[in-house]
């Protein structure tokens, strides 16, 4: 078994949650999302991010607005919808439960 493959699958599973956490705090442009994820040591490329943003938008979890830019064409800023905020709360509950389980297992004596 390859550790890198497992790590990659773990990151993919967390990506949606992490993006929604970022957008809960403030609306963001796609390149800003990528930068913030990089700063958090979660490397994501545009080819991964854009399809995910589109899927979240199609599921009515994200909305967006075009904002004029001083450095070129208008930019699409993503934000959580009301449905997205509710979904994020459910994800946060699931994350806490999963994290608690992992902590219990890692601290238990086998």
Image (cartoon, grey):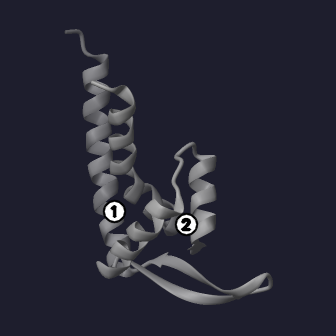
- The residue under the point 50% across, 84% down is 64
Question: How far across and down, in percent of the image, does residue 17 sit?
Answer: 39, 57
The answer to whether the residues at label 1 and label 2 have Cβ atoms under 8 Å apart is no
Residue 28's tag is none
In the displayed structure, 75 sits above or below 91; it is below
Q: Is mark 1 on a helix, strand or loop?
A: helix
Give the quarter of the figure containing the N terminus.
top left
* CA neighbours of label 2 inside 10 A, class few (<14), some (14 to 19), many (20+): few
Residue 57 falls in image quadrant: bottom left
Q: Is residue 66 left or right of residue 53?
A: right
Residue 87 in percent (x, y) is at: 30, 68
Viewer-closest of 62 and 69 = 69
Q: How far apart are marks 1 and 2 (CA)?
A: 13 Å
- Which residue is depicted at the point 33% across and 49% down? 13
**In the image: residue 66, left or right of residue 14:** right
Q: Residue at x 53, y 57 (%)?
A: 45
- Determine which residue is flagged by label 1: 89
Residue 24, horizontal then vertical, whole percent: 49, 68
The residue wearing badge 2 is: 25
Q: How many labels does the image show?
A: 2
Give the mark, 1 or 2, whose residue is nearer the N terminus.
2
Q: Where is residue 107 in the image (x, y as percent from the top left)?
A: 31, 17
């Amino acid at each position: 078994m390859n550790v890198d493959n497992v790590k990659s699958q773990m990151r993919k599973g967390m990506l949606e949650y992490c993006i929604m956490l970022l957008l809960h705090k403030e609306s963001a442009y796609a390149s800003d999302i990528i930068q913030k994820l990089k700063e958090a040591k979660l490397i994501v490329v545009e080819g991964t991010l854009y399809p995910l943003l589109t899927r979240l938008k199609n599921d009515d979890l994200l909305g967006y607005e075009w904002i004029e830019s001083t450095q070129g064409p208008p930019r699409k800023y993503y934000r959580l919808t009301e449905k997205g905020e509710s979904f994020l709360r459910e994800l946060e509950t699931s994350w806490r439960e999963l994290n608690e389980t992992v902590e219990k297992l890692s601290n238990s004596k086998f």
